[in-house]
Amino acid sequence: MALPLYLQNRIGNQFERKNLYLKDLAQGKTVSPDDHPYLNKLKTFQEKEATFLKELEERVAALPPETDPTVTRLQKMLYQAQEKRSFYQSYVDLSYEAELAFKTADTMTNHLPLMLDTHEEIKQEVAFNQTALKQLDPTVEQAAKDALTAYQKDMPAKKKAEFDRLNNLRKQGRIAKKAQTNAKKSFLRSQKMAEEELRLQVPSIALSAEAKSLNYRQKHDLKRLENLMMAEIDEFSQTLPMESNKKRAFHHYFTWPLPGLGQILNKQYIKGLIFLIGSLFIYLVAIPYALGYGNYQGDGVAGLITLGAGGKRLDKSVIYLIEGVIAILLLVFAFGIAYLSFRDARKVEKEAVLGVRPKNWALSKKMISEEGFPFAVTMPSLVLITFIVLVPIITTILLSFAGWDPQHQSKFSWIGLSNYTNLFVGKGLAAGLFWRILSWTVIWTLGASTLSILVGFFLAFLLNNDRIKGKFLLRTIYLLPWATPAFVTIMFFSIMLSTGGIMTDLFSGLAGKQLFVKDNIILTRVALILIKTWLGSAYIFILSTGVLQSIPNDLYEAAQIDGASAWSKLTRITLPLVLYQTMPLLIGQYTFNFNDFTIIWLFNGGGPPNTSLYGNLAGSSDILISYIFKLTMNNQFQSLGAAIAILISLGLIAVTYVGFSRSKAFKEMK
Amino acid sequence: MNQTAKKPKKRLFGRKDKSDVYLSDRPPLSTAGIIGLIITYVLLISWAVVVIWPLFQMVKSAFNETQFQYITSGQRFEFGLKHFKALFEETNYLKWVWNTIWIALVTMGLTVLFVSFTGYAYSRFRFRGKKFSLMGLMLIQTIPTFVGITAYYAMHQIISGPVPFFTRQMMLVLIYAGGGIAGNTFILKNYMDSVSTDLDDAAKIDGCSYMQTYRLIIMPIVRPMLAIIALWSFMAPFTDVLLPTVLLTKNQDLTLAAGLRTLISDMRTLNQPAYAAGGLLIAVPIVVMFMLLQKQLIGGLASGSVKG
């Protein structure tokens, strides 16, 4: 591989090499570095440059200081820039470095006088302001102050008069309530502005306000101009290429053992240091943890395989499992850091071979703060989600392949797919109930959700009638089941429906015989579905009301003219529109109810028990999610519970995925 | 309620009076229409009764001095604050309130902080893996938090080893906050997408950094949605029974919802009327708030949904 003949800058423009020695090399000539004429010239330049810089420093130090340190600093910079400009001017054609130095000095000579002027100007204004403050005319001051106090004194009376006028207008019904409040607000605002104007008529107040603004300018104007200058210099430094004698890039491979090393070899020290901090995380946290050091009980990644078999008696397999998962996630983070560092170093180096000047820290920082912004701000959330959401989910997935059951509580091992096969064929004490519980879960989901939707929509439809009076009151009442916390109402229903409870007695009276709702399978199930309807219809009612009110009346009027009956108006206009707009939320009702643990658990704890059908592990109103709860919390079948949880989650994910990936919101996303 | 029922009847009769000028722009009702209207009223009012009656019973039991440990029917009503007194004196009610409030506040703060950053990043930037990770967030949030319950136990054990002051309540806060990020990011992103990006461009021209653009321009505009997210995440600990019941072991560490459950599920502390009283005390502020904010809350629900 040969040296490229032409150099490139960042935008891809091509440049002739100024380094004739390297140019000869690139053209394939055999030249020796010892007596190449260009190299000799370059050497003399470098020697001269060194002496020049040294002398310049001495001369600058010898400059007489001004009284104002800022002026001294700026003037020294200006002097330096002027000297450098005249020195480098004659070497512009020799090398790109000299050209850069010349241009930098040139820009500074252009900018610095303006900065000095600005500084001087502000200083003068401050002095002027201070003298004016000292020589205030007491009569003018007093007169303005009197005017202000007089105005302030009048204000309450004026306010009262105006408000009274507005209130009267409102009472007479000539203006709306909204107009009244708005007029009051705008009156107050204009009063305040008039007061502020009078305040600024007072010389002392006006002058101190000015002093404040001058103070701000003094602090920030110079800084802003300086930033502008530096930005201009950075900008054109990127348009110049850099001579390089590099043929191939290899520094970036060093980032694999130690992220940051490649950057340091590329002479990007600050960036390198930042990546080195990442290396600290890799070598002090991620890798030791994965090897089992610093674990609570587990053994890093190895613990995932052994699950603590042969460990101490008190060691728990589940801890080994989770620490293994955490170790793997830490390794993923570590790999991410190493890969980022590798990619960055490779890019910089490949560009350097072409002759692109590497970015300095100021430019890198700017790029990181722009392009890296979304990553930087989502990072904390990502970490939290990884450990709070992802670790449990991965753990649950892994648990479903393990044999954590009542016989293997503290130590268990991998058993492959047998939890799942047991569920499918219904084998075993706990897994055998799966299909029976699933069927009630499906009935429950369909029954409760459909009934809630029907009742909620029907109520909204009935109430959306111009002739109904007392709409507000009825609507407020219908909202109550949604607004009251569900657990409060569910538990109270549970109290009322227990034996001797208020509702049991009421229904017993209606049925003509004593009912035992919570001991009867059918009654419990019916009660659950009805309570859910009571709770869930309120939400559907709100949603449908919103949609119904937004349907334009024209549609119904047009239908009326065409002779449509009330029924066809409902089925051809209302229903399609409502369904179209609320479909995702209605589907959400079904997925929510499928997993509505709260109502099952709080109402009757999944009961009543029915040992002949359900054994001791579940009750007859348990749905899958409450069955999982019983399996993991009460009956120590954690692995089986995990397997059911995974099956449920997969189903939910599939439903959501289909709905979501078809949605317009997702397709249109850029 | 009877009044509301009578009112239209009066008007219907009034309309038959020919001397009355008919001012409504609706067509006059036919006989079938009148019957339909009456049926509508009957249906609407009976559902209102169905809604009100259980709630009324709860209020009544909370104030009924003649109820003892169990709430039973057929008791005479005698007004008194006995059960509220029992709630405050015999249970850890005030402790529960305090626990819930601080857990809710920290959860709310964390959620709003995290979500405002992620929402902004997802709404305003194009970056590698955006679509993929958004889909991931969306799918992760459908998995019930409860699925990871066994893992949370063990994780708490692991963390509290090296960090002894890490209590189970803190674990609960992290679970609430971490679990809320995904869904709320989605809601906020959708809302922010409706804010024109011209504003961002204008801010950038004026020299704002991204942080400033968010803080000074975007955040004030999306504040209503942020407020709703804050409200929902504040409410979550007030209404969740499951996680605190499972995770927190000591009675004085419980949150309100889990604590109140002990009043009807635990034979040692069973006191159903006190439960009704405590439920009433939580429900009233929440109901009032929902009523006042219903428009915004419903708007939040709808815009967070994935519209087809």
Image (cartoon, rainbow, N blue to C red):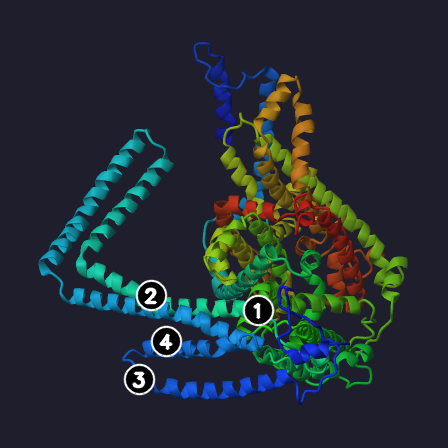
Crowd around label 3: few <14 · some 14–19 · many ≥20 (10 Å): few
Query: First in sequence: mark 3 or mark 1?
Result: 3
**Chain letter behind tag 3:** A
Element on which disc 2 rests: helix
Mark whose residue sits in front, 1 or 2: 1
User: Residue placed at 46% from the left, 9% from the top?
Assistant: B18
Element on which disc 3 rests: loop
Element on which disc 4 rests: helix
Give residue B148's quadrant in the image: bottom right
Can you identify the residue that label 4 sits on? A74
Mark whose residue sits in front, 4 or 2: 4
Residue A367 picture location, percent across and down: 57, 67
User: Which of the two residues, B227 or B293, is positioned nearer the viewer here?
Assistant: B227
Query: First in sequence: mark 1 or mark 2?
Result: 2
Residue A475 picture location, percent across and down: 54, 37
Location of residue B201 with respect to B153 vertically, above or below: above
Query: First in sequence: mark 4 or mark 2?
Result: 4
